[in-house]
Image: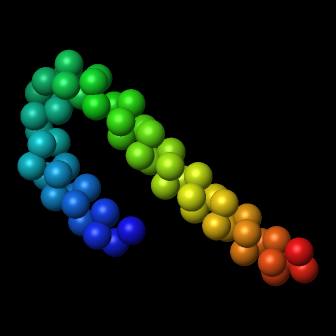
Amino acid sequence: MFRVNISINYWYRNTGNQFFNNPRSSCLLLPLLLSITGQIFYWSWTRMSLVFHTTNGG
């Protein structure tokens, strides 16, 4: 996860300004970013729910 974060930050620094200056590319890549963040949120949510269930005794 840490390596993915670094790559996302690096990619954002290199191409973030181009996205803000070019709405079409941002609209094309917005679903990709949403899916990536959705997967991360889903992964963290399932992990948290697993921890919650195990601490609750199953």
Q: Residue furthest top?
A: 24
Q: Is residue 6 above or below residue 41?
A: below
Q: How is the image coloured?
A: rainbow
**Is residue 49 placed above or below 28 in the rendered structure?**
below
Q: Position of residue 29 (x, y in %)?
A: 28, 31
In the rendered structure, the answer to whether residue 19 lies left or right of residue 35 reads: left
Q: Position of residue 37 (x, y in %)?
A: 44, 47
Q: How many marks?
A: 0
The residue lying at 66 percent from left, 60 percent from top is: 46
Residue sitting farthest toward the right: 57
Quadrant in the picture for residue 53? bottom right
Report x, y in % for residue 38: 50, 45
Q: Quadrant of the N terminus?
A: bottom left
Q: Which residue is drawn at the image coordinates 54% and 53% (left, top)?
A: 41
Front one among 20 and 5: 5
> Which of the image's four quarters has the C terminus?
bottom right
Check the image and report above or below for 54 versus 41.
below
Write down the quadrant of residue 8 in the picture.
bottom left
Q: Residue at x 19, y 49 (%)?
A: 12
Residue appearing at x 42%, y 38% in the figure: 34
